[in-house]
Amino acid sequence: MPKIVDHNRYRRELLQRALAIFAEQGYGAITMRQIAKRLGVSTGTLYHYFPSKEGLFMQLVQELCERDITDFFDQAPVAAAVGDRLRAVVAFYLENFRFYQQQLLLWVDFHQHRQRAAPDEQPFLQGFWQRTRDRLASYLQLPNPAHVDFVLVFMDGLLLQFLYHRGEIESDWLTQQMEVLVALIDAH
């Protein structure tokens, strides 16, 4: 009797394992052949599930985005006050800060090495940003949509500050900065 394979589950497993490889090697420094070898599968198997390294990476980002959104909303409190909702977002962000830092570095590497898309094609990472922004806007229900953009830009800025200081930033400093964000949003 032939072996029954859940292809979707297997594809997700490959993606999950590929994350560690991309995180360790970077996007530009590794080939599909090297990824396949590290995953313990043939190159043909990898190409069966992913059309290219770029396709594999884009599916990985999609999975991460969906997982982040699902993980957050599975535990997000239904709070009446905007400040409380923002604090819930901030707490989730701080709990996953190192992971988001790793994602940012991978995305910068991807952007630097990917083949140029057609001028009329929406950039992939812009699509990720928009989906995240839309879900965050829905949850936060801020009166000014520009405030949602500010929250996301502020969080990305914290990731960069952490890099500038070579990981020496105290978690108290991060918490303090996030409280400033909550105060600014609450004030408006």
Image (cartoon, rainbow, N blue to C red):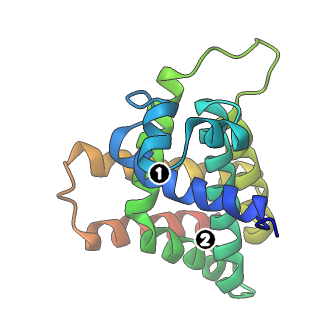
Residue 84, above or below 153:
below
Disc 1 marks which residue? 40
Where residue 74 sits: x, y (%)?
70, 82
Disc 2 marks which residue? 186
At label 1, counting other C-alpha atoms closer than 10 Å, the crowd grade (few under 14, some 14-19, many 20 or more) is: few
Under mark 1, the amino acid is Gly
Residue 2, above or below 118:
below
With 135 as the anchor, is 85 left or right in this view? left
Residue 14's disc is none
Instruction: Tell me the quadrant of the picture where the C terminus can be found.
Output: bottom right
Residue at image location 61% in from the left, 71% down from the top: 186
Where residue 90 sits: x, y (%)?
52, 71
Can residue 112 be seen in this snapshot? Answer: yes
Under mark 2, the amino acid is Asp
With 69 as the anchor, is 115 left or right in this view? left
Q: Residue furthest front?
A: 1
Tell me how far mark 2 sits from mark 1, CA to CA: 51 Å
Query: Is disc 2 placed on a helix, strand or loop?
Result: helix
Instruction: Tell me the quadrant of the picture where the N terminus can be found.
Output: bottom right
Residue at image location 70% in from the left, 17% down from the top: 117
Task: State if disc 1 and disc 2 touch (CB < 8 Å).
Answer: no
With 122 as the anchor, is 126 left or right in this view? left
Viewer-proximal residue among 187 and 63: 63
Q: Give the image quarter of residue 30.
A: top left
Residue at image location 72% in from the left, 87% down from the top: 79
Where residue 26 sits: x, y (%)?
39, 37
Viewer-proximal residue among 48 and 118: 48
Where residue 47 sits: x, y (%)?
66, 36
Residue at image location 68% in from the left, 61% down from the top: 10
Q: How many marks?
A: 2
Can residue 157 be seen in this snapshot? Answer: no
Query: Is disc 1 placed on a helix, strand or loop?
Result: loop
